Amino acid sequence: MKPDELPEDINNPKPQESGGFTPPIPSSLSDSPPISDKSEELIIPQDAATPEKVTIIESQIETGRERESFPPAAPATIPEITNPETEIAIAETVAKSQSEIETGRERESFPPAAPEQNPPAIANRETEIVVAETVAKSQSEIETGRERESFPPAAPATIPEITNPETEIAIAETVAKSQSEIETGRERESFPPAAPEQNPPAIANRETEIVVAETVAMMASEIETGRERESFPPAIANRETEIVVAETVAMMASEIETGRERESFPPAAPEQNPPAIANRETDIFLTSQGEKENLPAEVDAPMRIFITGASGCIGHYIVETLIEKTDYELFLLVRNPNQLKFDYNARPGIHIVEGDMREIKRFGQLLKTMNCAVLAAAAWGGKEAIDVNTFKTIQLLKLLNPKVCQHIIYFSTASVLNRQNQLLKEAGQAGTDYIRSKYDFLRQVNRVPIAKRMTTVFPTLVLGGDEKHPYSHISGGLPDLMKETEIIRFLDKPLLKVKPIDLIRFFQAEGSFHFIHARDIAQVVRYLIDYPPESQDSRWLVLGNEPVTINEVIEEACAYLNKPITHRFNLSPWLADMFIRLFRIEMSAWDRFSLDYRHFTYQNPVNPSTFGMPVYCPNIIDVLKLSGINGRR
């Protein structure tokens, strides 16, 4: 029907002789220009829609013949929308187009022939039943996840254009094989070499980059919808570090963007990449002597140990022992390398990581490659103690990779434990900043999954230090026992000076404690690195020799210094207060608690003899000798 032959009363359409119904024409289309003659030639009148012609059209659709066989005027079939049979057909067509847009199929990217095939198929359908069947078929294809190329009426013919099979049997076999692999989650590399080689030529033979973009979009859609991706998680799950996961995702994204075929991803690539990253050193984190080297990726590579607090008293002895007695690769976190008194160039595999616990996040990538960690760093007071000893230490634990790090040795303090080796609540209430921070850490660390691999050691009174090692707090003060100290002043002038050891020998007091030398601690740490505890019950170890009483210490010291004990006074609480004032001793809340608690003893103390090794400093005489105090004869 030509535009000039439209019914006079558009709003009141009349039935036609064929029994059809002419819908009203939308006002937006009433002013459209006349349709060209070629378009007119393609319009099939209602009375001309004979069964023979319908059969021919449907036969062309079913056999998947290329729609180029239509007369050259095929592109002009687009105006068919202006001349639909029914409003239902218009609505169905719009809905179908909208559905295709929403599902991410960019119809413009198909070859020009593709859009030309679909409209005639809909325009030439006799009934709404055919339209409904087409919509239902499309909906079924969307739900089943079949390739979107099968959507146009020529769908049976569009499948072979990708895989180029000879027969529908080959198509069915390929689809069945793909479906089987999706269900079983097999790796895509399991396709025969010929299978991946058939697909690229189909892509390579496309005329424009638009088609390549369509293929890439389809691949991206499959990744997002989870099609054929079930086989990928195991590869990620087997990665040893999160760095490797990021590298793999980045490589996949790069391949998708460039349109590279997925079969070009060599199966060995994911296996080769993790060791390279896991063992890589970066100039950002490490400042080791000599030229940087790529660490070996062999299975029998030396254990990689991250150590904090290496510049302290205990840290010096630990690092020195590990350098001399092992071939482990050591990564030492220190703020100032100039404070190190040991030779970190004594052998290869010793790396200085210059930094601070407060910026531990900087070293996240390095920490993920560690097999073991020894955490001996500590801040002694102020807000820094809470930040470093609690929060930053927990952050460090979270940065370790549970798949790589097998053991952690954490240094706490015995002051946070009671006599049954349980947490002492007074430590969290009256303790110093240092003690409270250690107490808080132990209450929070169980929230970190890797904490189950952590061995916590609780040093008692630590001795140690010489010209090659920093002094501990106690050893640093022992020589003062032999120095004269002012005990009475008048008008800012000293009236009485006395050596503390000469005064102490006349008193006795109730109390007991453990002590241990830092060199013995280092021996225990080395043993724990080589042989981590197997039972969770033995993950808390108090480091110390057998307990000694205050009176025993005084007696042994006086005997060593040849100072006789004639008579002794009991140091009662009121007398202790007098000495505190006399010697102007500052007392904190924790000091007051300790004075009342008196017996700082623990169950099952651990020292080198526990593991069959000799003890370096087992008694008080050894303590005095190692502190540089010479005995008198």
Image (cartoon, grey):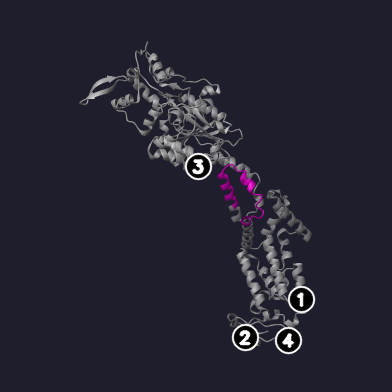
Q: Position of residue 600 (x, y in %)?
A: 44, 27
Q: Residue at x 63, y 88 (%)?
A: 9
Q: Position of residue 101 (x, y in %)?
A: 61, 66
Q: Which mark is residue 17?
A: 4
For label 2, the SS is loop
Q: Position of residue 187 (x, y in %)?
A: 68, 48
Residue at mark 2: 11
Q: Which mark is residue 364?
A: 3
Relative depth, front residue between 291 and 312: 312
Q: Earlier in the sequence, mark 4 or mark 2?
A: 2
Q: Earlier in the sequence, mark 1 or mark 4?
A: 4
Q: Earlier in the sequence, mark 4 or mark 3?
A: 4
Rendering quarter of residue 358: top left
- Marks 4 and 3 sit apart, C-alpha to C-alpha, by 82 Å
- Marks 4 and 2 sit apart, C-alpha to C-alpha, by 19 Å
For label 1, the SS is helix
Q: Amino acid at mark 2?
A: Asn
